[in-house]
Every structure is written in C-alpha cells, then in structure tokens.
Image (cartoon, rainbow, N blue to C red):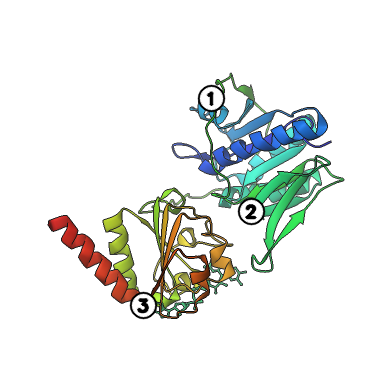
Amino acid sequence: MDGKNGLWVIVERSANGFRKVALELLSRGRDLAGRLGEVSGSRPGVWAVVTGPGSAPGTEELYRYGADEVLMVCHPLLEEHRTDLHAAVLADLIRERSPGIVLFGATAWGSEVAPTVAARVKTGLAAHCADLRIDGRGLLVQCVPAFGGKVLGEILCPDRRPQMASVRPGVFQAVPGDAPAGEPLVVRPELDDDDRIKVLEVQRREITGKPLEEAEVVIAGGWGVGSRENWQLLEELAGLLGAAVGCTRPALDEGWTEGEHTMIGTSGKTVRPKVYLGFGISGATHHVVGMKDSGLVISVNTNPNAEIFQFSDFKVVADARAVAEALIAELKAGKTS
Ligand SMILES: Cc1cc2nc3c(=O)[nH]c(=O)nc-3n(C[C@H](O)[C@H](O)[C@H](O)COP(=O)(O)OP(=O)(O)OC[C@H]3O[C@@H](n4cnc5c(N)ncnc54)[C@H](O)[C@@H]3O)c2cc1C
C-alpha cells in the first residue's frame, strides 16, 4: 500500500516564495499519484506540506503545479535555520497522518531535514535521486546514480512506511496545470525549544549572476580553461550572451570560480539549458550526468577524442582561450555594427 494517505512533497520556502524544486516535485508527484491510481485502483492525494513561522503567501502556485491539498505547519520557532525543529514537527505529522510517500528536494535544507525525519520515523531514505517511478506493485522506485553515475541503482522500500526520497533540483520539470487553488489547511503544532541549538548569527552570502538551473544558456568551464585569467573570459562571454557560468570540480578546486552552487554534475547542479557551451571539459560521467539533458551542446576541447564530444552536437577542436576570445570579439563587433 503505497500512496495510502497521500503522497507528500515537503516544500522549502525561499526569500520570495517557494524553492523551485518543490514545484518540480509536485508536478512529478501528480504523475506518480496518477500511476498509483492505475496500479492500485485508488489515486492518493498529492499534499504540499509547508513548514514555517507563519502562513506563506502564494499557495495558489502549489495547487497549480500539482498539489491537491496544501498543509501549512506554523510555529514561531520554525525559522529556516532550525532544521532540528522542522524535522521534529514533520516526524510527528508523519506518525499522525501516515503518508505513503514523502519527497524532499535535495537542497542543503532538504539534505539535512530528510534523513533526520527518516531516522525519527524509522524508515529508509533514498538520497539525491535522479528519477522516481512507480512499479507494477505500486512501489516507489527510487533511482540513484551509482559507481560515479555509470549506472542508476534502483532502491525500493517494500516494508517500511513512508517511502522517502530526496531529489536533486532540476531533475524534473515544473509543469503548471489548470487545477483551481484550494484553501490550505493550517496546523499549529506544539513545539518546545530544548535550547540544544542556539543560533548566534545568520550570515547570508549574496549570489551574483543568473542561477544556473534557470538559465537558457550555460557557459561551463573545466580544468582545460587553464587559469583564473582565462576564466574571466568565460564570465565576459556569459555577460554578453546573458548566460550563467557553471564549472567542473577541478575548476572549482582551482578557485577560478567560487561556491559549490556553480558546479554541474553528480555532486552539483543538474542543468537543462537550451544551449550548453563547454570549454576545456573532458566529459567525465560525474559532470555529464548534470548536463546531458541540455538542448544544443557545443564543446571546445584540444583533444579530438575527448569523451565530451560523444555528448555534443558541435565539436570544436581548439584552444579554449582562443575560442572564447574570438566569440567575445565577434559579439562585441555585432553590438557596435
Ligand atoms: C564522488 C565524485 C563526485 C564528483 N562529482 C563531480 C561533479 O558533480 N561535477 C564535476 O564536474 N566533477 C565531479 N567529479 C570529478 C569528475 O570525476 C572529473 O574529475 C571532472 O568532472 C573532470 O573535470 P574537467 O573535465 O574539468 O577536467 P579534466 O578531466 O582534467 O579535463 C580537462 C579537459 O580539458 C581539455 N583541455 C586541456 N587544455 C585545453 C585547452 N587549452 N583548451 C581546451 N581544452 C583543453 C583536456 O583535453 C581535457 O579533456 C566527482 C568525482 C568524484 C570522485
């Protein structure tokens, strides 16, 4: 019995609404619930569960992307950084309402809350899933990249409930429907702050530039870019094209770009831009897993046998710096003529 009492998507709030991965999961949840209905004869409801200090505005969006019901769990202590308290109220609710499936976004927040909840309710968690589907018995098949992304492992949780998974942002598409918005159900749990964690200060890092997962054009750079100076050319090119800049692990380790949020691949972001333009990237599976669903893929590499060319529509065997400079000159000339 698999979606009994509902399929829950735990919705993470953002500064201006909800994290996009929650909308992606609601859309996928709608499909999974439909499939469960076919297999078991009874379609479970899709629930968007939002925790926070107060009611969140904009819940129509949750209905539009797939929620049948919205459950707002409000308590003044449920600030974003008190993940221990979010986990505690979610575990209590799960025990009380027994959802069959619970899905989280594998963001920093979700990656902390999901395993804590799973441990509290004594079930399993398939973390960082790259796909989810329902099998012929109505079980949730949780696909997780294994062996460096070379194979997709299928994880089932036949005996414990709920079946729990976290899913990387960008894996599914957020598809709006035309379902009317309903009235969210609000619960106000009792919650004690046992003072085990004290938040002394919250520092927010400003992230500049376009978010990778929302960009239509992504310029990605790898170790073959060669230097921080050359990296500046990729930034300049991205500026001219209105693109976001992404990187591989070695480029990040070299310090040419800052922050894990710019890395594409199994341990980073999944992108599916209309155009992916990669410079000096070999095409290791760990990276390819995060960009293989891009539209047009153009790769620049000095090695004619580079693996990345297997996944590219246009293969440019050339020096990364030379191609970046030529493109910048061409775009600048186009702008002034
Ligand atoms: C558990 C685990 C998780 C990982 N997760 C990720 C991840 O999420 N994302 C990720 O990217 N990596 C990840 N990695 C690392 C990954 O395995 C590869 O090592 C990495 O993707 C390779 O990066 P690269 O292509 O930049 O470098 P390299 O493999 O060193 O390739 C550099 C390429 O540049 C070319 N080149 C050299 N000079 C030039 C030039 N002048 N002009 C043009 N081309 C040139 C070379 O021919 C080569 O093909 C992970 C590794 C592990 C073990």
Q: CA distance from mark 3 to mark 1?
A: 48 Å
Q: CA distance from mark 3 to mark 2?
A: 33 Å
Q: Which residue is mark 1?
A: 178
Q: Which residue is mark 2?
A: 130
Please indicate whether residue 122 sits to the left or right of residue 107 in the image.
right
Residue 127 locus on image (x, y percent): 68, 54
Residue 74 locus on image (x, y percent): 60, 29
Kind of residue sitting beneath label 2: Ala
- Judge the density around disc 3: few (<14), some (14-19), many (≥20) Cα neighbours within 10 Å: some
Q: Mark 3 or mark 2: which is in front?
A: 3
Q: Which residue is mark 3?
A: 318
Q: Earlier in the sequence, mark 3 or mark 2?
A: 2
Q: CA distance from mark 2 to mark 1?
A: 27 Å
Q: Earlier in the sequence, mark 3 or mark 1?
A: 1
Kind of residue sitting beneath label 3: Ala
Residue 238 locus on image (x, y percent): 32, 59
Kind of residue sitting beneath label 1: Asp
Q: For disc 3, does the CB lie below 8 Å from ligand 1?
A: yes
The reply to whether discs 3 and 1 touch (Cβ–Cβ < 8 Å) is no
